[in-house]
Amino acid sequence: MSRPTVRLLLSHPAHFLSLGLGSGLSPVAPGTVGTLLAWALFALIRPPFSELGFGLFLLAAFVAGSLFVPLTGRALGVVDHGGIVWDEFVAMWLVLWLAPAGFWWQLASVVLFRIFDILKPWPIRIADTRFKNGFGVMFDDLLAAAYALLCLAIGVRIMATV
């Protein structure tokens, strides 16, 4: 397994996207750095889309990631290399899209997503270990997104009763 480099990042569009526009090159916590960049980019990429359009964009980003992430994985020697953060981008955009509006809800979205992506509770860990391909890399982060969204929904219910 090798470390991603700027040379690899710039050598192919698949690597540029897989490595999260460079955020995956972070020597410390590339998944968290990628998630934070995805959060920052959300404010730029969301506005031009309708609800349906953004849903289709996320679907296309998921499918495309399932296809190009393995190219970067092969170049790095492991399909789910920590520097590959496109899966964090897509999952974080999904959570932010469905989360309640406002900075604090967005911050909670980021924190919850990272907790579930790092801890990998059931069935995330099963998906992470069983599906060692592009789909699997993308899918386990969707499961972490689902856990984060569930917690946010519970938080909304609790806040409505306070």
Image: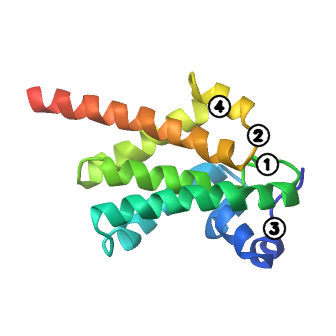
Q: Whole-Å distance between the Cαs marked 2 and 3?
A: 23 Å
User: Which residue of the protein is positioned furthest toward the top in this rendering?
Assistant: 122
Q: Position of residue 33 (x, y in %)?
A: 58, 56
Q: Is residue 126 shown above or below 95?
A: above
Q: Position of residue 103 (x, y in %)?
A: 28, 54
Residue on which the image places disc 2: 132
Q: Position of residue 158 (x, y in %)?
A: 18, 27
Q: Amino acid at mark 2?
A: Lys
Q: Secondary structure at mark 3?
A: loop
Q: Whole-Å distance between the Cαs marked 3 and 1?
A: 16 Å
Residue on which the image places disc 4: 127
Q: Earlier in the sequence, mark 2 or mark 4?
A: 4
Q: Whole-Å distance between the Cαs marked 4 and 1?
A: 14 Å
Q: Earlier in the sequence, mark 4 or mark 1?
A: 1
Q: Whole-Å distance between the Cαs marked 4 and 3?
A: 28 Å
Q: Amino acid at mark 4?
A: Ala
Q: Position of residue 68 (x, y in %)?
A: 71, 62
Q: Secondary structure at mark 2?
A: loop
Q: Earlier in the sequence, mark 1 or mark 2?
A: 1
Residue on which the image places disc 3: 5
Can residue 26 be seen from the camera position used here? no
| Dot 1 and dot 2 residues touching (CB under 8 Å) | yes
Q: Residues within 10 Å of mark 2 (few under 14, many from 20)?
A: some
Would residue 3 appear left or right of 33 to someone viewing this image? Answer: right
Residue on which the image places disc 1: 79
Q: Earlier in the sequence, mark 2 or mark 3?
A: 3
